[in-house]
Image (spheres, rainbow, N blue to C red):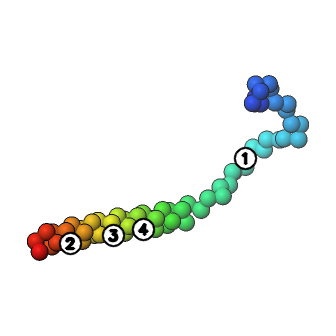
């Protein structure tokens, strides 16, 4: 490894490598997927709301022009 300055980092004598061990993750894949689906649904709801508001505004403008 190299430091920001470009110099080599000194080896840490206390670091050891253990074979046969598995690395665990701090991410719950199922919960992350559920959160992603919820966010996608909220996003779609907001897009539909914006579209509906735009359609209502256009209808109101047409009614004002006709009157």
On screen, residue 66 versus residue 15, left or right, reads: left
Q: Residues within 10 Å of mark 4 (few under 14, many from 20)?
A: few
In terms of sequence position, does the residue under pointer 1 or pointer 2 come before the other? Answer: 1
Q: Are marks 2 and 4 in contact (CB under 8 Å)?
A: no
Query: Which of pointers 1 and 2 indicates the residue nearer the eye?
Result: 2
Q: Residue at x 59, y 62 (%)?
A: 28
Residue 16: quarter of image: top right
Q: Residue at x 38, y 67 (%)?
A: 46
On screen, residue 55 versus residue 38, left or right, reads: left
Residue 59 in view (yes/no)? no
Q: Are marks 4 and 1 in contact (CB under 8 Å)?
A: no
**Cα gap from disc 1 to disc 2, whole angstroms:** 69 Å
The residue positioned farthest toward the right in the image shown: 13
**Cα gap from disc 1 to disc 3, whole angstroms:** 53 Å
Q: Residues within 10 Å of mark 3 (few under 14, many from 20)?
A: few
Q: Residue at x 41, y 64 (%)?
A: 43
Q: Quadrant of the C terminus?
A: bottom left
In terms of sequence position, does the residue under pointer 3 or pointer 2 come before the other? Answer: 3
In terms of sequence position, does the residue under pointer 4 or pointer 3 come before the other? Answer: 4
**Residue receiving disc 3:** 49
**Cα gap from disc 2 to disc 4, whole angstroms:** 27 Å
On screen, residue 6 versus residue 26, left or right, reads: right
In terms of sequence position, does the residue under pointer 1 or pointer 3 come before the other? Answer: 1
**Cα gap from disc 3 to disc 2, whole angstroms:** 16 Å
* Residue 20, numbered label: 1
In terms of sequence position, does the residue under pointer 4 or pointer 1 come before the other? Answer: 1
* Residue 42, numbered label: 4
């Amino acid at each position: 490894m190299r430091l920001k300055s470009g110099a080599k980092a000194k080896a840490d004598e206390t670091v050891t490598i253990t074979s046969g061990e598995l690395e665990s993750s701090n991410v719950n894949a199922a919960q992350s997927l559920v959160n992603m689906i919820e966010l996608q649904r909220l996003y779609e709801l907001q897009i539909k709301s914006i579209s509906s508001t735009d359609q209502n505004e256009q209808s109101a403008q047409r009614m004002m022009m006709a009157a």
